Image (cartoon, grey):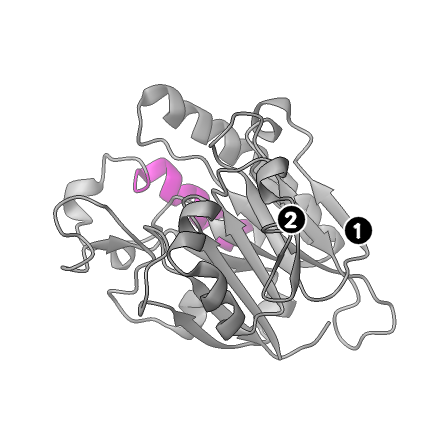
Amino acid sequence: MFRLVTLNLNGIRSAANKGFEAWAASVAADCMGVQEVKAQAADVAGRFEVVAGLKGHFHFAQKKGYAGVGLYARKKPTEVICGLGNEEFDAEGRYVELRFDNPKRRGVQKLSIISCYFPSGSSGPERQLAKFRFLGLMTPHLQRLRAEREFILVGDVNIAHKEIDLKNWRSNQKNSGFTPEERAWVTHTLDEIGLVDVFRTLNPHPEQYTWWSNRGQAWAKNVGWRLDYHLATPGVAALARAEHIFLDQRFSDHAPLRIDYAFTL
């Protein structure tokens, strides 16, 4: 069984102060994607390079205390890819891909695990336009990757796809994260590119959220959004067996999302 976890940390040092490392040890993941690391290489060195026995691979933002992604793995990848080859978004540290290619492995010979942090547009129109540029960049990238290999992209997509994916959907239809354009991007990614929203194949129930605002007792009232995903190619998505959103302890304004797959690296 391959256990894959994703978590927006909202700062790796802040999350560590709230028990993130002990939790990571207890979950026994094979790979763990993290987003919004909010750290630089010097901050990670000697402290967060290895967590729970997993070696970290990072794509840091140029700006201090901003964005950044990481992908921790128990097994050494055959290749590490940082960034999308786009100057604007590579400067923000939004994409890291680990490739685990093995021609002798049964079923899935070419496999990528990706940790990705999609921009938020909630701070204003300028960032919303940046978010749309990022979505426009990701569409052909995912199409190319889909043609070449199996993959699982985990991360904070910053979009709730359907009405079931957020509590107050009626009042949020014009707000970033639930605009018609963003939701259409997810639909296109699933229906046209052919990726699978793995969590939803395992759990069709309402009130399954991974992010809560820090305002208005949103956590206490479970007024949340499902912003964190496993988006996978069909071959590997079909091997998904169990999902879990961890709610017993908070390290961030996001909750960890774990999915177990019936294969091994």
Tell me which amino acid carries mark 1: Glu
State the quadrant of the N terminus. Answer: bottom right
Please provide percent x and percent y for residue 82. 69, 40
Please provide percent x and percent y for residue 250. 32, 59
Task: Give the residue pinned by disc 2.
Answer: 46
Question: Of marks 1 and 2, which one's residue comes earlier in the chain?
Answer: 2
Is 180 contained in the magenta span?
yes
Residue at 55% x, 30% y is 92
Q: Quadrant of residue 101?
A: bottom right
In the picture as drawn, the residue positioned furthest to the right comes out as 104
State the quadrant of the C terminus. Answer: bottom right
In the picture as drawn, the residue positioned furthest to the front comes out as 46
Q: Quadrant of residue 256?
A: bottom left
**Is 149 located above or below residue 145 in the figure?**
below
- Secondary structure beneath label 2: loop
Residue at 49% x, 36% y is 67
What crowding class fits label 1: few (fewer than 14 Cα within 10 Å), some (14-19), or many (20 or more)? few
Secondary structure mainly formed by the magenta segment: helix
Query: How many angstroms separate mark 1 from mark 2 (CA)?
Result: 23 Å
Is 187 contained in the magenta span?
yes
Give left or right: position of 173 versus 177.
left
**Is 186 located above or below residue 257 in the figure?**
above
